[in-house]
Image (cartoon, grey):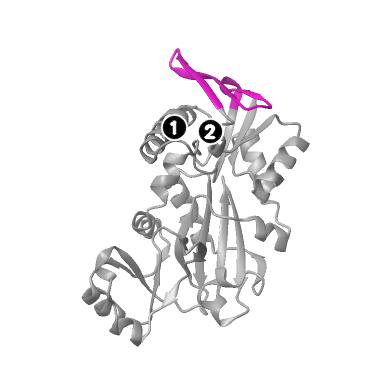
Amino acid sequence: MSILLLAAEDDPSADAMVRTLTGRQAAVHRIDTAWFPRQLTLAAELTRGRWGGTLATPHRTIDLGEVSAIWYRSPRAYEFPAEMSPTERHHAGIEAKYGLGGVLSSLPVIWINHPARMADATYKPHQLALAASCGLTVADTVITNSARAVRDFAAGGPTVTKMLGMGSLVENGARRALYTQPLDTSDLADLRGIEHTAHQFQRWADKHHEARVIAIGHRINAFAIYAGSDAGHVDWRTDYDGNRYELTEPPADVATGIRDLMKRLDLVYGALDFVIGPDGQWTFLEINPGGQYGWLEHHTGADLTGQLADLLMTGETR
């Protein structure tokens, strides 16, 4: 049996996972879907209702029938020869998605996480409603492209805006991160352009600090995040180095809600973000089915890689 890692070539967390699994004498194969089709060849055949065959690189051949677990760790998009026309590349990308992606996603193995479940879970309106139904406290939220709706909502108290999907964008050749932003009177006075797409606005939750929870199977790892700057207090992602990180324990009802949410989203891994108020109230912000965790290991010594390796090797999920 073997474990397949689908990850970008320059991913330190994937590097650590390969070392951990190799140290446990597991057979591990790491590929990046960006290698397809120039450095990765697929030869798959459906026999007795299951896809088998091989994935081959210039250095190794992977027997799909031997794969027992797959870690879907943000592999890159397929890359096609430059001499192909835009139409040809678009066509090839769709066929690769449903061909290579379809074969892999059909394998009846342990997934962290299955890409279809990840795709479902990334819809913020869905996860917010589901989190509330699981007993977690969720901030009041409006999603709209109406300036009037924004102003009406903001009249009810301090409000922030945050992205529904993209965490960054490329503009003029440079990548720019998109952080949570408080709305002030000047923002509300000029909402030009809001009509062009959907936007998310949320009631500001009174904040003492924040927490990121890394759920791995039945295990819940909670990390308190104490901001070291004003910008970090609004969005801790703006100031990783200025923050202070500590292991913590969520209240029992929050832990129960997290496990219920994970089960209902059919995820075995999730990175969840919470605001903790001065009164100790935990307010759910979002769940990222492929969220980062490596820097938390670095700052706290928590063995999250080991927990993920346990899950890949044993299949124990809950």
Was residue 56 drawn as part of the magenta stretch in this picture?
A: yes
**Badge 1: how crowded within 10 Å, few (<14), some, or many (20+)?**
some
- The residue indicated by pointer 2 is 36
The answer to the question of whether label 1 and label 2 lie on touching residues, with beta carbons closer than 8 A, is yes
Q: Which mark is residue 96?
A: 1
The residue at 60%/72% (across/down) is 239
**Badge 2: how crowded within 10 Å, few (<14), some, or many (20+)?**
some
Between the C-alphas of marks 1 and 2, the distance is: 8 Å
- Which residues are drawn in magenta? 41-67
Instruction: Give whichever of 161, 172 is nearer the camera.
Output: 172
Quadrant in the picture for the C terminus: top right
Q: Secondary structure at mark 2?
A: loop
Q: Position of residue 163 (x, y in %)?
A: 40, 64
The secondary structure making up most of the magenta span is strand
Q: Earlier in the sequence, mark 1 or mark 2?
A: 2
Amino acid type at mark 2: Phe
Q: Residue furthest right?
A: 23
Q: Which mark is residue 278?
A: none
Q: Determine which quarter of the picture holds residue 28.
A: top right
For residue 262, above or below residue 92: below
Was residue 27 drawn as part of the magenta stretch in this picture?
A: no
In the shown orientation, is residue 151 left or right of residue 283? left
Instruction: Give whichever of 77, 258 is nearer the camera.
Output: 77
Q: Determine which quarter of the picture holds residue 153.
A: bottom left
The residue at 44%/75% (across/down) is 181
Amino acid type at mark 1: Ala
Q: Position of residue 172 (x, y in %)?
A: 47, 64
In the shown orientation, is residue 198 left or right of residue 131? left
